[in-house]
Each structure stands twice: as structure tokens, then as C-alpha cells.
Image (spheres, rainbow, N blue to C red):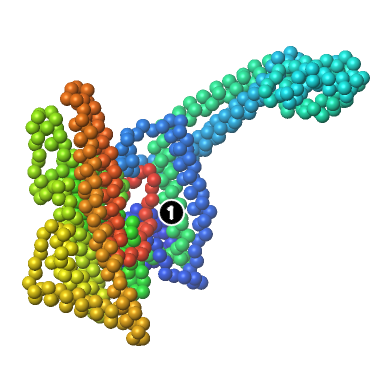
Amino acid sequence: MAVLEMQRISICAMKKDRKAILEKLQSFGALEVNHVIGEDPDFARMDTAGQKLGFEKAAASADQALEILEKYAPEKKSIFSSLEGKELIEPETEKEVQAERRELLKTAKALYDLDRERAEQLASITKLENSIESLTPWLPLDVPMKQKGTRRTALLLGSMPGEMTMERICEVIAEKVPDAVGTDVHIVSSEQSAVYLAVVCMKEDAAQVEETLRSEGFARPAQIWDDVPAYQKKELEGQIADCRQRIAQIEEEIRGYADQREKLKIVADYYRVRADKYAVLGQLPQSRRTFVISGYIPRSCAQKVAEYLAGKYDCAVDIEDLKEDEEAPVILKNNPFSANMEGVVESYGLPAKGEIDPTTIMSFFYVFFFGMMLSDAAYGLIVAVVCGILVWKFPRMSAGMRKSLKLFFYCGLSTVVWGVLFGGYFGNIVDIVSAKFFGRTITPPALWFVPLNEPMKLLLYSLLFGVIHLFTGLAIKGYLCIRDRKYMDFFCDVVLWFMLLIGLILMLLPSSLFASISQMEVVFPAALNTLAKVLAAAGAIGIVLMSGRSNKNPALRIALGAYDLYNITGWLSDVLSYSRLLALGLATGVIASVINQMGSMLPNNVIGVIFFIIIFLVGHSMNLAINLLGAYVHTNRLQFVEFFGKFYEGGGRPFHPFKENTKYADVKEETLS
């Protein structure tokens, strides 16, 4: 239960060693760069924005090439590929790829060009298909659409609204252009929305005839072809075939680059790491011959870094403790069990300056409550076995994923324990199977009690565990007050509340209300009853008088104290929140029992057994998934809202070290250990 102590390290070295020192610091991944030198005439900063942008573009180009390869030549991956983590490569392999980096960038560009050409070919196909679609109504026409007529006649091609008929068109022409003798109208094709026609008339009448037709909705074709429409269609289809053939060639060419995939991954990481290095390089204060780099480093490895650099390079390394008002980044460090719950704390907020890391204390409550909510030994065993196998099978998985799986592994073990205590094994599957298929009911005994038979007992224990959880949080607040020598705060904000709450609990236990809920009667000696009342009264009076102690106005002070005393309703709400331990624990067992009962309604024959197995597998899988999610969400809520609310605020800044942030592969490097 600790936050790693941080120190500030400052390194002043010769410019000639700048590249080597930066690369070594980046490989160590132990330093968060944070410069203390501001504007200084003796120190300047390089403008590395151009180089950084160039490296980022190179990395993006390689990433894009990999995406193209994945599109046309997918890499074969198992369903657990996300757990495999990044590949570990030898330094020699990385150096070989670095030597080929320019050729690999040309390969990436070639892949990009091929993919772009393919997109252009597809666009051409779409354009040609649209042309064929617009040409289709004119296919019956046996002359080129570009044909304008003969020496004496004119040919007018166009479309009119679908309701126009041959008779109507002829009537319009005869009515409005009576002198256009010999005008001939041919319907080429017709659709519901349009009629496509060819009109032959004398050249001297062409303008009048066209103007007359336009008044009725006549429109020339949007596109005119040189050839006869039927022949033109064949030519367009041939062009489409050529495009498709070229697309097939392009895809085959792209697949031919599949053997470059691993090298492209390494070169993408290489440029990504260089971009990060140049981003830091641009921040370094530098003189003509020296440079300075400063930042935060964990105390545990500060001396090792200093000794390594001083022994290998001509440099001065200074390590100093942080100033009182300096807020350093946070790294959590816990025992192997509690470290797996650090992600839960991080999702809420890292400890701020002066706060303790609550991970260790919270971790035991977390596993305890999770198991109580899921509360089925078979479910817990499945979760623990699956998570354990995955952690063992995939040693290269990311640290965050490993911690999450280990968290669920321990939660699964806790669930097994609670399942044995409550006698839950896939609900009541043992009872159902033994009665249905063997004619004799066998019920595995519960080591403690069966919640479905005694729900009020489970409710009482749930509230008891909640009180212990909340009191632990209040006790931690008291510890922080004593540690910071805030003795008045300790008495007023912790001791008085303990007196009030303990007094109220002792007054509640022998009451008729508690007896009606718990079905048992508690009798205390008269002296203990009197003590409970004294504690509650003293605590309440003390809270009213002391909660507003920072205010000098007596009336306002008492008003603030009375308002703080009203927070007793918040404590009641918090305690009742732990009834979710009862609700989720019962939900798991009830749903499991319903699934089993559904299966037991089938006949005792082969078909019945098959459907029983199907119902069992599907039903319990869904029940496990739903209640696993419910247990996770509600366990987090009990920590975040009820527990942390008593002493913890968070708001710390995470540690962001200067390291090799690779995407695809890690390189075996020298470490500080």
C-alpha cells in the first residue's frame, strides 16, 4: 500500500553524447521529462517540429500500408490474439530492418499507390455502370446518337414525361407547328416516368419542332455517344471488364507484399519511437557544447540510472528530493495480490499529494464483496480456471490485461469460497439432476446457510459487512488526521462520528424493529443501554457544536453543525447500499434455479437429455455473464461511492515516462534490474 517516492534527476552532458543518452533513457523508460530551466540566454531549444512531423508521417505511412495488407491479405490470428501482446524481437533484427527503412517506406508507398489505383478503378467502374444505365433506354436505336440527320432532315433525340403518348406528341406538333409537314415521331423506349423518342423533321422546321416539344417537357440526353447504343454498351462493358481485371491484378500485387508485414511493423515502431525522441529533443535546453535534461524518476531506480550514465558518459547527474509544494506524478506499488486492483483505483483517480494509496485495503474488500455477489462455486471455478489459464498461456499480454485477468482470478476464488458456504453449484443443479435422472434427491450441504432459505439472515450480514467497510474508511480518515497532526479534526470529524454511529447501532440492536427484521431478540444489560444513549447523545451534541468550528459566528457555527449532523441520513443510505450484496447474491441463485427447473420439465429420453444440456449450457452461460458484469459494476460502486467517499478524493497525475511506445513489437533491451 504505497505510492512510489519520486525524486528529481538532472543530467548535464556533452552534446556529442546527446543521441546515445536519450536513446538509453528511452529504453530504460524510468524518466518523465520535466524541465526546470525556463528562458535562459545561455540555453536554447532546437526546433525539431519538422523532423518529428517527418517521423510521424513515416510511421503513419507504414501503419497505413499494414492496414492495406490486412485488408487484402489478412494475417491469420487466433480468437485470443488480443491477449498475445506485442512480439519480442532481437536487437539485431531491429538493426537489420532499420538498415532497410528507406526501401520499406518505398514499399509502403507502393502499397498506398496500388490501393489508390484500385479505388480509382472502382470509381471508373461506377462511372461506366452509370453510363450503361443512362444508355439502356436508347439500346433499340439503330443509329449513332451523335447522328444529326441527313442533308435535308434533322434528327432530334430526347425524353418526355411518361404520360406522353405517340398520339399526344403528334397532336402537339400538328397543332403548334402546322407547317412541319413530314415530321415523323418514333418511340425508342418508354418507362413509367419517361418516354424516349427520336423525331425526324425537315431541317428548316427543326428549331420550331424542338421548341414545341420543350414546352411539353422534352429534354435532350445528358450524354451523347458516337456509336450505335448497342455497340457502345458492349464497348463500355469491355472497359468494365478491363477495370475488373486490373483490380484483380492490383489485389494480387498487394498480396505479394505480405512477406514484408513484419518488417513494416518494426519500421513503423522505429519511426514512432524516433518521433517521441525528437519531441523530447525539442524540449532540451542546450548550449553550444552541452545539454540538460531533467525530470521525475522513482527513488528506487534513480541511483542506478545516475551510476550507469556517469560510468558510461562524460556527464554530471544530480538527484534531489522534491520541494514541499511540488506535486510529482504518481506510480502505485503494492504487493502481488493487491497490485491487480490498481486499475480499479486508477479508474477512480490516483492519490493526490498527501493521500495514501487505498489499493491494499480496498483489494480485500473488493474480492470479498465480488465473491459474495456472484456466490456460486461452479461459476467461480469457471472464472478462476479460465483466467488462470489465459494468464499462464499468454505471458506477453499487456500489463493492464494481465492485472485485470488476475483480478478476476482472485474474484473467482472468492466466489468459490462463498459458493461452498452457501451451497450453490450451478444453482441447485445437483438436486435437479439427482432427482430427474436417478430418482433420488441429493442436496450438497451448505457450509454456512442457504440464502434462498434465509434471505433476512443474508441481509443482516450484508449490512454488517457494509458497516465494517464504512467504519474502515472512517478509520483511515482518522489515521490521516493523526499522521498530519490534525488532532482536532481527528476528534471532531472521526471520534465524534464513531461515538454517534456506535451509540445508534447499540440502541438499534435490542429494539423491537431489529427483532422483527432479524427474527431474534438481543438483550443488553441496562448499563450498556445507558452507555449507548450517552455515546449517541455526546456524539450528536459534539458534531453540532464542533463541525462548524472554523466559523466564529456562534449561530452560524451551530447551524453548520446541525447541517453536518443531518449527514446521518447519508450514513443510513450508505449502509442500505450494501443490501445489493443480498440482491445480487439471490439473483444469481434464483436465475440458476429457474434455468435448472426449465431443463427438468423435459422428458427423460434422449431428446430430453439433449435439450436439457442445451438449456443448461446456454442458460448458465448467460446467467454467468450477466451476474459477472453485475458483480463487477456494483463492487466498484461500493468502493467508489461508499468507501472512498469517507476518506479519499484522488486527483493525482499519472506517471508518463519517456519510453519506447511501440505498437507492434518490443525489442530486447538492457534494463535497470
- Quick one: label 1, few (<14), some, or many (20+) residues within 10 Å? some
Of 273 and 371, the residue lying toward us: 371
Q: From what the image shows, is residue 462 above or below residue 606?
A: below
Residue at image location 25% in from the left, 70% down from the top:
477
Q: Quadrant of residue 164?
A: top right
Q: From what the image shows, is residue 441 above or below residue 141?
A: below
Residue 429 image point, x, y percent: 16, 36
Q: Decide if residue 42 is on the left or right side of residue 564.
A: right
Of 182 and 481, the residue lying toward us: 182
Quadrant in which the N terminus appears: bottom left
Q: Quadrant of residue 157?
A: top right
Quadrant in which the C terminus appears: bottom left
Residue 418 image point, x, y percent: 15, 49
Tell me which amino acid carries mark 1.
Answer: Asp
- The answer to whether residue 551 is seen in the rendering is no
- The answer to whether residue 178 is seen in the rendering is yes
Q: Quadrant of residue 153?
A: top right
Residue at image location 84% in from the left, 26% down from the top:
212
Of 217 and 172, the residue lying toward us: 172
Q: From what the image shows, is residue 41 above or below residue 67?
A: below
Residue 294 image point, x, y percent: 39, 65
The residue singled out by tag 1 in the image is 276
Q: Secondary structure at mark 1?
A: helix
Residue 361 image point, x, y percent: 21, 61
Residue at image location 10% in from the left, 46% down from the top:
446
Of 2 and 7, the residue lying toward us: 2
Q: Decide if residue 532 is on the left or right side of residue 178.
A: left
